[in-house]
Amino acid sequence: MNKIIKLTAVICLILSASSCKKYLDIEPIGRVIPKTADDFRALLNSGYSGFPNHKSLLAYRTEELLLNEDNSETNNYRDIYKWNDVTPDPVSLQFPYLSMYKSIFYANTVIADVIDKAGQNGETEQLKGEAYLLRAYGHFELLNLYAKPYDKNTAATDRGVALSLTLDLEQKYTPVSVEKVYDQIFADLSEGLKLINVTTFEAGKNYRFSKRAALALAARIYEFRGDWANALKASQDALALNGELEDLNVATSVLPNHYQSKENIMSMEKAFDPGATNASLISAHLIGIYDQVNDKRFAKFFSKRGTDYRSLKGNLDALKISFHNSELYLIQAEAALQSDNLSLALQSLMALKAKRLTPAYFAAEQTKISGLDKTALLQEIINERERELALEGHRWYDLRRYGQPELKHTTLGATFTLQKNDPRYTIRFPQDAIANNPNLQ
C-alpha cells in the first residue's frame, strides 16, 4: 500500500491540478483508487501520520520556554516567541494550515467511500468512525489556533475556520462562524462514537482513534466550551473504561505520555519535537512551579545541563501523545467543581497527585487542599494542569481559556509584551494560506 501514501492519490482523483491548487495549494500526485479495508487503513494512516506536530510551536508563545540564543535553530522560533505573526522572518516556522486540511482530506475520503467500496462490517465501520473523529479533531485544532476562544455570547458571529467536508476542492474555502464549526465537530463526534468499536488499541497501534480516545476528545471539547455536565460525563465514561495512572514513586514507571504508559489513550502527535528542544531552555517560571524534591515529575520531565534545564518530554516517537488519563482526571476535577461537586473535584485532583508526589508531601498537600474554597480549588486545578501537562501543547490553550494574561518575553536584549486580552491570543492564518486563499483575509 506504499502507493497510497503519496498525498492526494485519492482526494484529487477527478480534479485538475489547477483547481486543486486554486484554494488550498494541493496538487494531485497519483490516481490510485482504494478498494479494500487494507487500502483504506493505509489511506487513513496517511491522515494520522500527516497530522501536524505544532504543539511545540505553541509552547514558545507561553511562559514555559526561553530561547536558547546559542543554537542555530533558534531563528526558526524567534518570531513565534515574539508573537510576531504579521511580519515574521522568512525562516520562521509557520503554524499548520495546509497540512491540517490534508489530514482532514484523507479522513473525508474514508468517510465517503470505505463502506461503499469495501463493504459494511466491523472493520470498515471502525475505519469510518476513526475518520469522523480525525476530521473532528482537525477542525477543533484549527479552531483553537485561528479563532477566538469559545464565547457562547459571540460564537454565532465570531469568525471561525473553513470547514472541509467533501472532496470538492472547487468550493471556496471561506471561514464560517465558531458556532458552525463546533456544530460540525459535534456532528462528526457523534457519528464517530456510533461507529467506533475498538475500545483501546494496543501499544504500537495506539496512534489511532479508539472508543477511549473518542471520549477523551469529547471531554476536551466540552471542557473548552464550558459545557461542564457533558465534560464530566465524557471524562467519567472514558475513565470507567481504564482509569489507571502511572505511579511515579515506582522506579520502573514511565513518563505518562509514553506510548507504553498504562494511562496512555492515544499517541498520534509529537508534542515537543527535537528542533524545539534544541532551540529552547525551560523557563524559570516553569521550573518554579514544581517542588523539585517531592514532585516526582520534575526529574522525569527535565534534565539539567550546567545551569540550564531542558525538556525530557519529547524528541522520541515513543513520547508522541494526544490523550492520556491524567488529563481526564483534571477535566473531571474541573467539570465537577464547576458543577458544584467539590467532593468529586477534590477526589479527582488528589487521585492524580497521589501518583505524582512522594507520600509525605502528598499527605501535606491533601491537608492543605482539603480546606480550599471553590475559587482557590479551581486555581489549584489550573496549577496542576500546568504541572502535569507541561510541554504537551495545552498551556497556550489554557492561557486563552483562563483570562489571557499579560506575558513578557526577552530575546537579544529586547523585551516583547503580549498584553492582557491581546488580539494575538488568536493566531493569524499563515501568510502562504492567505496568499492562496483571499477568503482568509
Image (spheres, helix red, strand yellow):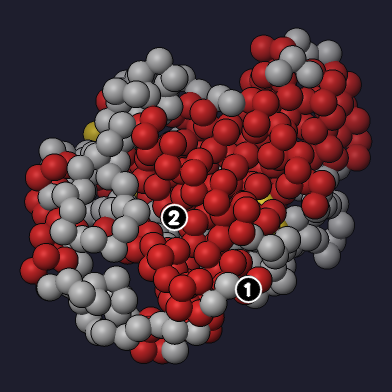
Query: Residue 215 location in percent, x, y?
Result: 65, 47
- In this rendering, the answer to whether 196 lies above or below 403 is below
Locate residue 321, reporting x and y percent.
58, 58
Instruction: Sort mark 1 into few (<14), some (14-19) or many (20+) by Cα contacts within 10 Å.
Output: few
For the residues labelled 1 and 2, the Cα–Cα distance comes to 21 Å
Element type where label 2 sits in the image: helix
Residue where numbered disc 1 is placed: 121
Residue at x-position 12% and y-position 73%: 17
Which label is found at residue 148? none
SS at mark 1 in the image: loop
User: Which residue appears at 49% of the width and 62% of the height?
Assistant: 131
Tell which of 167 and 277 is nearer to you.
167
Horizontal side, residue 5 vs residue 437: left or right: right
Q: Amino acid at mark 2?
A: Arg
| Quadrant housing residue 358 | top right
Q: Say if residue 395 shows up in the picture.
A: yes
Question: 413 above or below 392?
Answer: above
* Between discs 1 and 2, the one toward the N terminus: 1
Kindly tell me whether residue 50 is visible in this rendering.
no
Q: Nearer the viewer, mark 1 or mark 2?
A: 1
Residue plotted at (59% across, 26% down) = 227
Determine the residue positioned at 73% across, 61% down. Answer: 199
The disc at residue 135 is 2
